[in-house]
Image: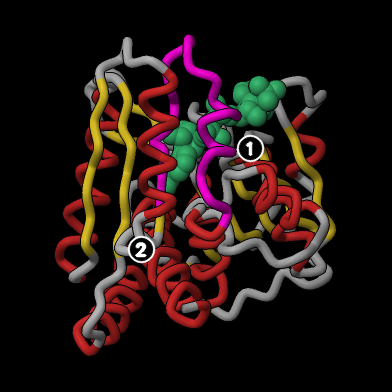
């Protein structure tokens, strides 16, 4: 029997609990999101984040700049947000336009307000097996989802498809920290199928449909991070869900799996940074 990893249900449960805590608090957590340009996908993501934050009672603001904004304008804003005690979490929505030095912008964020573990300091801590201020939202959401279904990664062969700094690489590091045996695959990987065939868990973060039924063994766990659209504009993941689903023990759907958990993690991380700042003051 296949069990669907229900990210929406877990999101609702986690955020319900979080709202109770925020309602009780006199001071409210603050999340600032910087959005540059008019990438429509980014605008939708940021809007969803803002709406979710507002429902929870998190003070959220979206700071928008046109695509041709000068780098210094964003750097000045980040410095201002770093100094602002009512802002506990800062997120720069990626991608940024070509002329902006992404690393410079990200590293301007105070590591104590770095809500997606983007800065070199937090990322370095993650890579070194130390505690970053908070863990990156998408991999954190995936681990919360697996925990909810009592799926223990210890000793399992976890195959992560994708090695981006945003998802694949931190996912591999975090699975390693959970004592999984990790293989990270990418566009240069030869014969992906021969590797996914040896997996206990496949986590795919690519952005195109590439996990087919003949690539996995029976009863494995599949987590689908990918988001793309079919020719009718319908959202889909990296996994051919219809054919793969019946072969798995657990599988996350798209939509309704990892996506809601990423937003939930962003809210949890905002609250975690807020709590840490209260302890410091
Ligand atoms: P990305 O930066 O484009 O990375 C994609 C990765 O896939 C790269 O490492 C690339 O390898 C690898 N890849 C491409 N083609 C491949 C192939 N044929 N076989 C094996 N690996 C291949 O994207 P990302 O930011 O990591 O996001 C990945 C997907 O997850 C996207 O669809 C994105 O929209 C989605 N996403 C979803 C959530 C969510 O909350 N659900 C959050 C974040 C991202 P190279 O490194 O060699 O190029």
The answer to whether one can see residue 120 in this image is yes
Left or right: 92 in relation to 195: left
Residue 122 on image: x %, y %: 66, 53
As drawn, 272 above or below 50: below
Residue at the extreme bottom: 24
Residue 123 on image: x %, y %: 68, 49
Pointers 1 and 2 in contact (C-beta within 8 Å)? no
Q: Which mark is residue 165?
A: 1
For label 2, the SS is: loop
Left or right: 99 in relation to 62: right
Magenta stretch: includes residue 262:
no
Q: Give the residue drawn at x 54%, y 36%.
A: 106
Viewer-nearest of labels 1 and 2?
A: 2
Magenta stretch: includes residue 96:
yes
Q: CA distance from mark 1 to mark 2?
A: 29 Å
Ligand 1 closer than 8 Å to label 1 CB: yes
Q: Give the residue drawn at x 45%, y 65%.
A: 269
For label 1, the SS is: loop
Q: Which residues are magenta?
A: 90-111
Q: Which residue is mark 2?
A: 85
């Amino acid at each position: 029997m296949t069990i669907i990893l229900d990210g929406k249900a877990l999101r609702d449960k986690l955020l319900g609990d979080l709202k109770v805590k925020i309602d009780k608090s006199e001071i409210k957590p603050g999340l600032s999101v910087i959005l540059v340009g008019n990438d429509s996908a980014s605008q939708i993501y940021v809007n969803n984040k803002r709406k979710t934050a507002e429902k929870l009672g998190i003070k959220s603001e979206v700071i928008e700049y046109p695509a041709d904004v000068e780098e210094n304008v964003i750097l000045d804003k980040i410095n201002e947000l770093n100094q602002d005690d009512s802002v506990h979490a800062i997120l720069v929505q990626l991608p940024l336009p070509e002329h902006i030095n992404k690393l410079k912008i990200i590293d301007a964020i105070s590591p104590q307000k770095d809500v997606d573990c983007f800065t070199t300091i937090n990322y370095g801590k993650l890579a070194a097996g130390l505690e970053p201020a908070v863990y990156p939202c998408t991999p954190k959401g995936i681990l919360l989802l697996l925990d909810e279904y009592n799926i223990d990664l210890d000793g399992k062969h976890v195959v992560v498809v994708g090695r981006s700094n945003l998802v694949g690489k931190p996912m591999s590091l975090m699975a390693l920290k959970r004592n999984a045996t990790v293989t990270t695959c990418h566009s240069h990987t030869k014969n992906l199928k021969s590797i996914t065939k040896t997996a206990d868990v496949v986590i795919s973060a690519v952005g195109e449909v590439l996990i087919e039924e003949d690539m996995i063994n029976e009863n494995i766990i599949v987590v689908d991070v990918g988001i793309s659209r079919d020719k009718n504009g319908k959202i889909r993941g990296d996994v051919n869900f219809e054919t793969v689903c019946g072969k798995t023990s657990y599988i996350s759907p798209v939509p309704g799996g990892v996506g809601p958990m990423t937003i939930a993690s962003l809210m949890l991380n905002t609250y975690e940074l807020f709590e840490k700042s209260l302890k410091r003051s």
